[in-house]
Image (cartoon, helix red, strand yellow):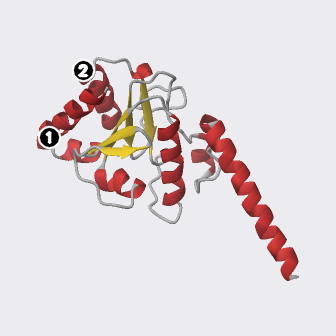
Amino acid sequence: MESIRTLMTFQEKILKLHYLYHLELFGESFCDDFPQSATEKKQGILGHSPKGAKIGFISQTPLLDQDSSFLPKKSAQMLEDIITKVFSLSPKECCILSLFKTSQISYDEHIKQHADILLSQISQSSARVFILFGTSEIADHLFSKHTELGTPIKFKHKTLIPTHSFGALIKLPALKKQTFQHLTTAKAFI
């Protein structure tokens, strides 16, 4: 009986490795392993990562729909303005990702899975610099050490710059000046 249980555990691990291999290989097609309702499963968004992306932006929840159009949210409008007005780029030239792949935020045992997938997406992207909108919301879950606002972090030949979350920017507009400084720092890495 014990050998059957061990065999089942081994097979589950092999299936999980197979899943992770395909996730990394075909990242945009796989979003099935997250705990979510049936309606959200249809809406799982892995993000937009075009070949030749010049810069990447990472939010806590998706800001794009499945057609890579911005969602009708203040944070999505804010990101679109940053891309076009601060960086003078088209959103199609940028990598836009999120920690969570649905609007449901759940800091449970699955956060490690979300973080691993996001780190894989970052390493596979052609963008060399990423802005992380949310230090405690995103950056602290990706890296074991505490991250400071505006301080560049090196990760697999990529530069990640944490700044204030969109939620904080909406609630406290005074943070926009400091965030603009972080965005200017990111511009220097492009």
**Residue 127 location in percent, x, y?**
42, 29
Which of the 4 image quadrants contains residue 13? bottom right
- Residue position marked by numbered label 2 in the rendering: 85
Image quadrant in which the N terminus is located: bottom right
Residue 188 image label: none
Seen in the image, is 141 located left or right of residue 45? left
- Type of the residue with mark 1: Gln
The residue at the far bottom in this view is 1
Seen in the image, is 5 located left or right of residue 102? right
Q: Residue at x 40, y 57 (%)?
A: 141
| Towards the viewer: 144 or 62 | 144
Q: Residue at x 44, y 30 (%)?
A: 95
Image quadrant in which the C terminus is located: top left
- Type of the residue with mark 2: Lys
| Towards the viewer: 50 or 101 | 50
- Residue position marked by numbered label 1 in the rendering: 178
Seen in the image, is 57 located left or right of residue 168? right
Q: Is residue 136 visible?
A: yes
Picture layout, residue 170 above or below residue 87: below
Picture layout, residue 92 above or below residue 142: above
Residues packed near mark 1 inside 10 Å, few (<14), some (14 to 19) or many (20 plus): some
